[in-house]
Image (spheres, rainbow, N blue to C red):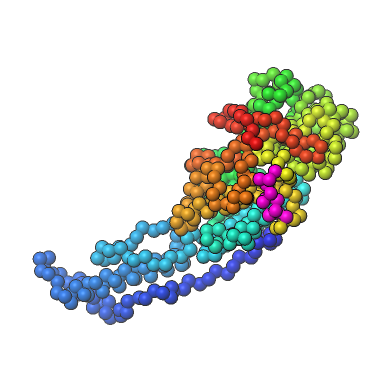
Amino acid sequence: MGRFTGGIWRSPPRPAWPHRHSSTTWPRITWGRLAQLANRATRRRSPWNSRTEEENTMKRELNILLGTLLAIACVALVACGGDGGGDKVAPQQTAGGGAIPAIPSAPEAPGVTENRIVLGAHTARSGALAPLLQVALPGLYEGAEAFFSYMNDEHGGVCGGKKIDWRVEDDQSTSEGALAATKRLAEDDKVFAFFFSMGDFGHDPAVVQYLNERRIPDMYLVTGGDYADADTLQHRFMFRSLTRYHDEGLVIAQYIRDNYPGKRVGILNVPEFQLVAATVQGVRDGLAGSDNEIVAEAKTSASNFDYMPQVLTLKEAKPDIIVSSFLAPQASFLLTAMEKAGVAPDQWTLIGSSATSDTGVFNLVGDKLDKLGGYYATVFARVDLYATDPRFAAYRDVLARYKPELKPVNPYTWFAFASAILMVETIERACGKGPLTREGLVAAAESIDGNFRHIPPDIASMLDTVPDPIKMSPTDHNPFGGWVVVRGQGGKWNLAGNTVFQIRDGKVTEGTVKQ
């Protein structure tokens, strides 16, 4: 099982053996003296008789010794991995009722040392899905790595000098591989938290249950799948980074109702992809009761490159709009099949989710998109601003210096970069509350309120452009909550209208885009 070793990801450091803290001076009391003290201390005496000075002295010595032994036991327990959770233990009491003086403690939590915070993730680096992810989601993990490298090199890391050590394991494109990779990172590497694991492929309920049962934070999971919508109280340690796919489907439906009343709708579904299946279900739910009839649904698979049967099915139903979550390769397959099937491009308008906003589509299909009735995507980030807006200047600069092969206009690069910003802000907030613990990290994430005060302002300014402020709470672990619609035309994305769509209590509400 290979480990992704590019950039700052590196082999786990060898654990240091527990050692005695050099500044601690222990009382010089022998075991013989202990026996003498214990014997004298346990003698029965009349409660109204006062102790002699010698007895008082011996009592104080015994209290000190018992307190010292308890302290040593506590240190040994932590050093040997007793609790492992990093949370504070209630103060011990000496035999005389006084609190034991504080002593230097072990690292705040597993994966946290004086100069390092270890995070983990899994994704498909081999197996059936690896080639698809490399083509369809380029720059996804490298975007996050760029920001972590920038923070480590130019700001000394986080929390006053702790470098971020992010370890990404290969899950081999399987659920079994994802669980095995998760266990290796949790049990062998003892990561502090998981960050940005690939959620749609392998990070299934078994992985979620494993992490939540062990109270290991599962931060900013790359998924919008319905399985991640479980009761927040039941899965309190899990946070997603993608918007809910079903919600995006509702937004697409609302956009169709607003702008294409009475138009006929066809669906291109890939049932094995949550990204597509949940989105089109949202479209169905959102169009229910409207004058937009769904006239056909054509199904395909992730491994299919020939979309001719699907195009012929849709063509027969005479739709005006085709809805899907078009990744760039799928859009290319569809347009090629349309041309072969004799479907005039302007007959169909294609509308997809945020996955559709990949700029790679312009390289794959050239000017074919301009001949369509329209090529639209719902997005939770302003992809139309990446290349030129001054609020993205620092983002573009960091990429140019740390990952020059990445294109800042790639939405997946921005998404990964933004998620890494969110993780750093979360860690910094947790550090500000005392020793860094897993419970503290969860509480810090739930306090995110749209104000990124621990991030360099020139970097944080890029988050001012999102349609709706990034925020979470104890009952809402989804940071992104607003969408706009963009149109692909002339080799770039342009804002299509001035409407911001939001989901409130399962219903779509509309506002105005902020510039």
Tell me where the magenta segment starts and ends, as one range. Answer: 389-400
At horizontal 68% and vertical 40% (from top left) the residue drawn is 382
**Residue 337 counted in the magenta span:** no
Q: Is residue 54 above or below residue 210?
A: below
**Nearer-the-camera pick, 502 or 129:** 502
Q: Quadrant of the N terminus?
A: bottom right
Residue 129 seen anywhere in this rendered image of the structure: no
Which residue is drawn at the image coordinates 72% and 39% (left, top)? Answer: 384
- Percent of width and height locating residue 329: 79, 42
Q: Quadrant of the C terminus?
A: top right
Q: Is residue 26 left or right of residue 186?
A: left
Residue 87 screen position, x and y as percent: 44, 57
Residue 59 quadrant: bottom left
Image quadrant where residue 116 sits: bottom right
In-front residue for pair 335/422: 422
Q: Quadrant of residue 14?
A: bottom right
The correct choice, above or below, for 101 with respect to 380 in the image is below
Q: Is residue 460 above or below residue 293?
A: below
Percent across and percent down for residue 108 are: 47, 60
Residue 472 visible in the current orientation: yes
Q: Which residue is rendered at x = 55% and y = 54% of the image?
A: 193
Does residue 395 belong to the magenta stretch?
yes
Q: Residue at x 34, y 66 (%)?
A: 101
In the image: residue 433, left or right of residue 459: left
> In x, y percent, where is residue 464?
61, 42
Magenta: main secondary structure: helix
